[in-house]
Image (tube, rainbow, N blue to C red):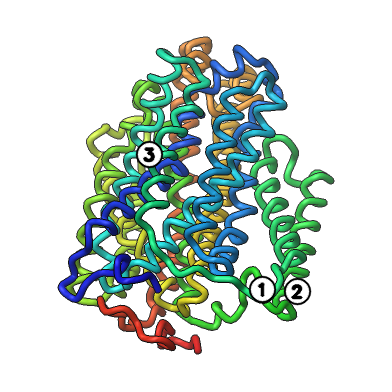
Amino acid sequence: MADTEAVVDSGGKQPRSVRVVLLALMIAMLLAMLDNMIIGTAMPTIVGELGGLEHLSWVVTAYTLATAASTPIWGKLGDMYGRKGIFMTSIVLFLIGSALSGMAQDMGQLIGFRAIQGLGAGGLMVGVMAIIGDLIPPRERGKYQGMMAGVMALAMIGGPLVGGTITDHWGWRWSFYINLPLGAVALLAISAVLHLPKKRAQARIDYLGAGLLAAGITAIVLVTTWGGTEYDWGSAVIMELIAIGVAALVGFVFVQTKAAEPVMPLHIFRSRNFSLMSVIGFIVGFVMFGATLFLPLYQQSVQGASATNSGLLLLPMLGAMLVVSMIAGRVTTNTGRYKVFPVVGSVLMVVGLFLLAQMDTDTSRVMSGVYMAVLGAGMGCLMQITMLVSQNSVEMKDMGVASSSTTLFRTLGASFGVAIMGALFNSRVQDVMAERAGAAGSAATSQSAQLDAAGMARLPEAAQEAYKHAVSSGTHSAFLLGSAVAVVALVAAVFVKEVPLKGAAAPEAGEGVGDDGVG
């Protein structure tokens, strides 16, 4: 556990030094979440200067792959060698990648440097969650849910706005350079104020397990990224990737049973609550990132909203998520009870997605905003509670792997959500365009079912009307699927066991074990 400077006192208040550390952690979390949002807005300008349009998707894919593959490894390294040094290393690596990306001279360099940046980003979210797990007992941690949800909302709303402003006034390279001063502030604050015990594990790092897990995750993310877009789902490339992914993950599980210091110790899954929260976290990722992809598309294509302020279009969902997350955190801290939130959150998520599936070409912005708020309230009940209960279900020595595993499942859920909901959306758009606009409609969406404003403007008026109906039908199918998947989260939430959260006092040696099967 941290020294006396880094724990909540018996009155529930915190020393100023801990508040400074929490601010630095929120900055690091903002860096991790903001990056892709900013870069997405700058992408057309980047392609205009560097060329390499055919490699454009790899600018995002390289970052995502590196982040997902490195996430569990950062968590384990923090458990073995001490969280402070490992976390600072991930920040430095992220900043090096950011600086190099800003100096890239061609698309190949940018993709490579984005991979370096992604490796660092893999440790940012895990480090934030694990350090908060070290500093603040679970009973008190609920207070900070609103802070973390606020950072997430700020990134999703502000990212496109900040990216557009920076690109227009300073140039696209500053989309990367902007990370440097923020990262420097976080580094200085953590270096000066954060005090955690140093560790030195005697066991060797499980390199084989780490390699197999990275290979398995990479294959999964590539399947979900390329399937139905770069390659047909039944193509040889996708089948080979699926085979590689399955073989790597089976090998990984076998290696974990033999390793002296496994990357992801399988005993953490003996905890019923931890396993259930992994399932719920996966589905939250599935639903949330699918929603953030298709809601702006629906609002722009069907409701005629401007693409410039795309982050603001999600304000009803993100605002509800922020408010409910703050309330859930306060109630959890005051009562020590939390099971109601996964159950209520899952119900609201199912209902919200079902309501969103009812939207058509006549749905008003007010009604779609109400539907989004219902979904946002559901996610507000779930976003931070999944991490809180996961961390409460393991021993202190496994805090890093618990945090990284929960983060990884949410990331993989997002990959699957975007891929599966996207495939269903694209299929429906193609079918409806063929029905309503014939061969001309099919040709218009043959390259991509997601037309931008310029692409829509080039269509004849009849085809534009057909496209609105096609997008409406596509979002209906995608959200209906999301609602069905969210039922699984509800079933999992029902079986969550209400294990008392550890209180404000620092646990004694030997405590820190959940009562639901971890011993």
Which residue position is annotated with label 1? 262
Task: Name the secondary structure under disc 1.
Answer: loop
Residue 126 shown left or right of residue 500 in the figure: right
Amino acid identity at mark 2 = Val
In the rendered image, residue 389, in percent from the top left (x then y), is placed at 39, 72
Q: Horizontal and vertical percent for residue 363? A: 30, 34
Q: Nearer the viewer, mark 3 or mark 1?
A: 1
Q: Which residue is mark 2?
A: 255
In the depicted view, which residue is nearer to us: 343 or 406?
406
The secondary element bearing badge 3 is classed as helix
Name the element at disc 2.
helix
**CB-based contact (under 8 Å), mark 2 and mark 1:** yes
Q: Which image quarter: residue 367?
A: top left
Front residue of 401 and 1: 1
The disc at residue 155 is 3
- Residue at the front extreme of this rendering: 192
> Of callouts 3 and 1, which one flags the residue occurring earlier in the amino acid sequence?
3
Check residue 392 in the rendering and tell me which mark sits there, or answer none: none
Q: Residues within 10 Å of mark 2 (few under 14, many from 20)?
A: some
Task: Work out which residue is located at the far left of the displayed protein and give it.
Answer: 11
Q: Where 185 falls versus 128 (above or below)?
A: above
Please tell me in which quadrant of the rendered image residue 385 appears.
bottom left
Q: Nearer the viewer, residue 490 or 206?
A: 206
Real-space Cα distance between discs 3 and 1?
Answer: 34 Å
